Image (cartoon, helix red, strand yellow):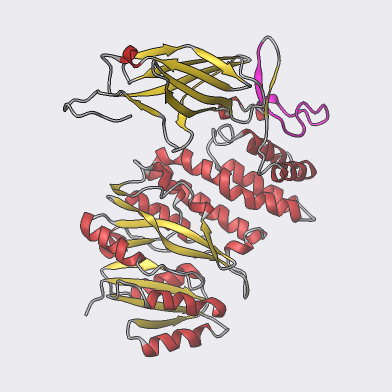
């Protein structure tokens, strides 16, 4: 009989981990599956483990090939697979028990071409959030697409997904050779799919290896590895440029946020930086013209030093970043007639290096932090207390204004200041008569020509702070405060 799902598992010298991976597949709540194990020329005991599962569980089948890499191994597994749906797992990772049942169930419900979900990172036996996938799967969204949910440009892995087999074949998807073979395929699948289902649950545990051979991602600072990564980046950019150019800016920003780190790390450790610097300049040249200009100021400084070959200075800035990882970096004003806001980083206006001021310009990174701490009825009015601050700026706010808004009307409020950024304001709900049932508090601040606006957030519950007018209801039922 044709299985509902085929899971392709390539493996090469992963004896310390493969048993845990295959056990996690054997106990999936979706038991109508086959597991296609592809031995990619293993020289350790991995094959013996795979043979043991294939001998005792008819759902496991073993395919053998000489060592060609994970891409060709996955392609060999696809050719052997018989399932209506396809999934991929790496033999050193773990799949949660209900993962495939959830993803296949959503595809059966919606008719989408692929389903994807959140990823946990297994580090020393502890499950953490995968920083590669952060901010992607905060809430479930069905029948969407990467051009509508552009955050999916950050979802560049193939193993946290289930694909319809007929979609895979119709789209002509196949893995290239090389060590970053999954990145181009993941992006192609997202773009070519008619619709995609996003699950909020963690569907895959991605391991950082503790013993045995280092994984590909753990050798990512090697020159050959970095060259392979650049090849994958070029492949993705060429595809997006042809099929979804609106995604290029987001992809470039992700490269400068995540991938470029491995070049920095390699430059921090190397003794002869020449070949790495040549590769680094090729990376930056590959990106769109606005990519570097749109990067955060501290990253722009790192890129500027790297492209100029100033490795010692780059290492100092990298140390500076790490030293302030928890406390954060400051932004300070410079100038009196025209005030600029610049990152308080090393080498600002250094006469020897002459780095342009715009490299340090951080005005676009500043945002207003507005919080309501309490709202209490005094018998005559509601009294609201809260705090305003500018993120990364250690200065007293010069001016602040507050008003209530229901989306159509604005009701200005008098403000009393407490401390550096605290405020107290009060209002009679009668002033809100004739308006909507829900009002939000908006703030405006001025600090040395820096003007910021934002909605106040609820300091206790999180989210936007809202005031519900007592007694207001379209249905005649009272809406409580």
Residue 481 percent location from the top left of the image: 33, 29
Question: How many numbered dots are placed on residues in this image?
Answer: 0
Position of 267 compared to 470: left or right?
right
Q: Is residue 125 left or right of residue 38?
A: right
Q: Residue at x 44, y 88 (%)?
A: 51
| In this view, 453 is above or below 277 | above
The residue sitting at 22% across, 60% down in the picture is 108
| Relative to 428, 422 lies left or right | right
Looking at the picture, does residue 273 appear above or below residue 59? above
Residue 404 at x, y = what percent? 39, 18
Q: Quadrant of the N terminus?
A: bottom left
Numbered range of the magenta stretch: 338-358
Residue 372: give x, y in percent of width and height: 48, 28
Is residue 352 rendered magenta in the image?
A: yes
Q: Nearer the viewer, residue 270 or 4?
A: 4
> Is 255 covered by the magenta stretch?
no
**Whether residue 16 is visible:** yes
């Amino acid at each position: 009989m044709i299985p509902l799902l085929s899971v392709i598992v390539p493996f090469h010298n992963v004896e310390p981990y493969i048993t845990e991976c295959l056990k996690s597949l054997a106990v999936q709540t979706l038991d109508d599956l086959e597991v296609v194990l592809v031995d990619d020329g293993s020289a350790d005991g991995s094959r013996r483990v795979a043979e043991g599962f294939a001998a005792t569980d008819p759902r496991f089948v073993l395919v053998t090939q000489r060592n060609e890499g994970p891409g060709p191994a996955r392609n060999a597994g696809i050719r052997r697979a018989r399932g209506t749906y396809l999934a991929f797992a790496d033999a050193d990772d773990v799949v949660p028990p209900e993962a495939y049942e959830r993803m296949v169930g959503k595809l059966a419900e919606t008719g989408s071409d692929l389903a994807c979900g959140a990823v946990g990172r297994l580090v020393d036996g502890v499950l953490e959030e995968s920083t590669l996938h952060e901010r992607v799967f905060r809430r479930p969204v069905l029948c969407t697409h990467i051009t509508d949910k552009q955050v999916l440009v950050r979802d560049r892995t193939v193993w946290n997904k289930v694909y319809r087999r007929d979609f895979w074949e119709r789209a002509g998807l196949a893995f290239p050779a090389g060590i970053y073979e999954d990145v181009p395929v993941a992006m192609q699948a997202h773009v070519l799919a008619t619709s995609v289902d996003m699950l909020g649950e963690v569907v895959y545990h991605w391991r950082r290896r503790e013993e045995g051979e280092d994984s590909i991602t753990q050798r990512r600072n090697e020159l050959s590895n970095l060259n392979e990564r650049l090849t994958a980046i070029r492949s993705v950019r060429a595809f997006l440029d042809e099929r979804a150019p609106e995604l290029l800016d987001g992809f470039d920003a992700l490269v400068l946020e995540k991938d470029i780190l491995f070049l920095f790390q390699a430059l921090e450790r190397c003794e002869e930086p020449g070949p790495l610097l040549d590769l680094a300049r090729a990376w930056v040249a590959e990106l769109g013209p606005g990519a570097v200009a749109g990067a955060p100021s501290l990253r722009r400084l790192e890129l500027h030093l790297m492209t100029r070959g100033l490795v010692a200075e780059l290492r100092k800035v990298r140390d500076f970043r790490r030293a302030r990882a928890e406390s954060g970096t400051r932004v300070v004003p410079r100038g009196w007639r025209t005030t600029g806001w610049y990152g308080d980083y090393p080498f600002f206006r250094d006469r020897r290096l002459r780095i342009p001021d715009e490299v340090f310009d951080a005005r676009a990174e500043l945002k207003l932090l507005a919080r309501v701490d309490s709202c209490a009825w005094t018998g005559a009015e509601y009294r609201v207390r809260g705090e305003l601050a500018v993120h990364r700026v250690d200065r007293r706010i010069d001016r602040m204004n507050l008003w209530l808004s229901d989306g159509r009307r604005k009701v200005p409020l008098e403000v009393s200041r407490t401390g550096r950024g605290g405020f107290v304001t009060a209002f009679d709900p009668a002033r809100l008569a004739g308006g909507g049932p829900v009002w939000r508090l908006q703030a405006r601040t001025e600090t040395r020509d820096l003007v910021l606006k934002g909605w106040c957030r609820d300091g206790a519950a999180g989210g936007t702070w809202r005031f519900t007018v007592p007694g207001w209801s379209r249905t005649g039922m009272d809406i409580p405060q």
